[in-house]
Amino acid sequence: MKKYIVGITGASGSIYGIRLAEEILKAKNEVFIVITDNGQKVMKYETGFELNSVLKRLEGFGKVNLCDINDLFAPIASGSFKVEGMVIAPCSMSAIGRISNGISLNLLDRAADVCIKEKRKLIVVPREMPFNTIHLENMLKLSKSGAVILPASPGFYNKPQSLDDIINFVVSRILDNLDIENNISKRWRD
Ligand SMILES: Cc1cc2nc3c(=O)[nH]c(=O)nc-3n(C[C@H](O)[C@H](O)[C@H](O)COP(=O)(O)O)c2cc1C
């Protein structure tokens, strides 16, 4: 059983992180969830879900651990705790700014910093429009440090029929990047 960290920030689109955690669990992996305070607030606003109910549902799919955002003593704060990788979905411009500048104000920032220093997979799913130069420069810095910048920009060439199709398009690209087998979205000319 491999271990993955799913980070959720206060950018729009917490549903991406929730769906992603579900798929990682269904693939028989362990998930560590770390969500910022703003992430919880925006999740409640956009989806109507409280974190507790999200966790309860995820627990039905496999082993999920909620990490306290302020607990810098948590296992994922250390490079000696081995994880396969981390995905921050959605990732706010604020979190990108903190991480790209090496500032670890909370456990999400620190876990991402650890992934970069240990050269582990870090996938950042930014959500903002338009990007300003500061956002772009910060993303370039992260990319140069080995992170994958995988924006929440669903394609429409597969003719999505529902919101689920659109969400799954992005989640499928993330899973592909993590090398986790999935068939949740139609593939081009498949
Ligand atoms: C409803 C709502 C939607 C937001 N959407 C975005 C967004 O898409 N991208 C972004 O970078 N910030 C967005 N923000 C602003 C972030 O929540 C804000 O920058 C916050 O400080 C991020 O904190 P965090 O990185 O600790 O989660 C949004 C805020 C609210 C209230």
Image (cartoon, helix red, strand yellow):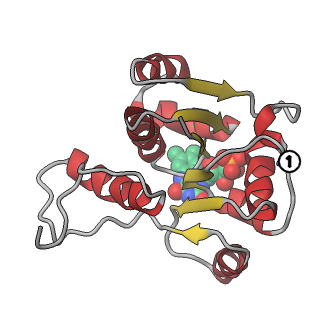
User: Pointer 1: residues within 10 angstroms few (<14), some, or many (20+)?
Assistant: some
Residue under numbered circle 1? 105
Residue 91 point in image, percent of width and height: 59, 56
Residue 63 point in image, percent of width and height: 53, 23
Classify residue 188 as left or right of residue 154: left
Task: Using the image as rendered, state which of residue 132 and residue 30 is in the foreground.
Answer: 30
Q: Say whether mark 1 is within 8 Å of ligand 1.
A: yes
Identify the residue shown where x is 20% and y is 68%: 156
Task: Using the image as rendered, state which of residue 41 and residue 174 is in the foreground.
Answer: 174
State the SS at label 1.
Answer: loop
Compared to 146, does 25 lie above or below?
above
Disc 1 marks a residue whose amino acid type is Leu
Locate the C terminus and report the quarter of the image it occupies.
bottom left
**Among all residues in the image, which is located at the extreme front?**
1
Identify the residue shown where x is 44% and y is 58%: 179
Identify the residue shown where x is 73% and y is 65%: 119
Task: Using the image as rendered, state which of residue 138 and residue 26 is in the foreground.
Answer: 26
In this rendering, the count of numbered labels is 1
Residue 82 point in image, percent of width and height: 73, 44
Compared to 89, does 3 lie above or below?
above
Compared to 52, does 157 lie above or below?
below
Identify the residue shown where x is 84% and y is 44%: 80
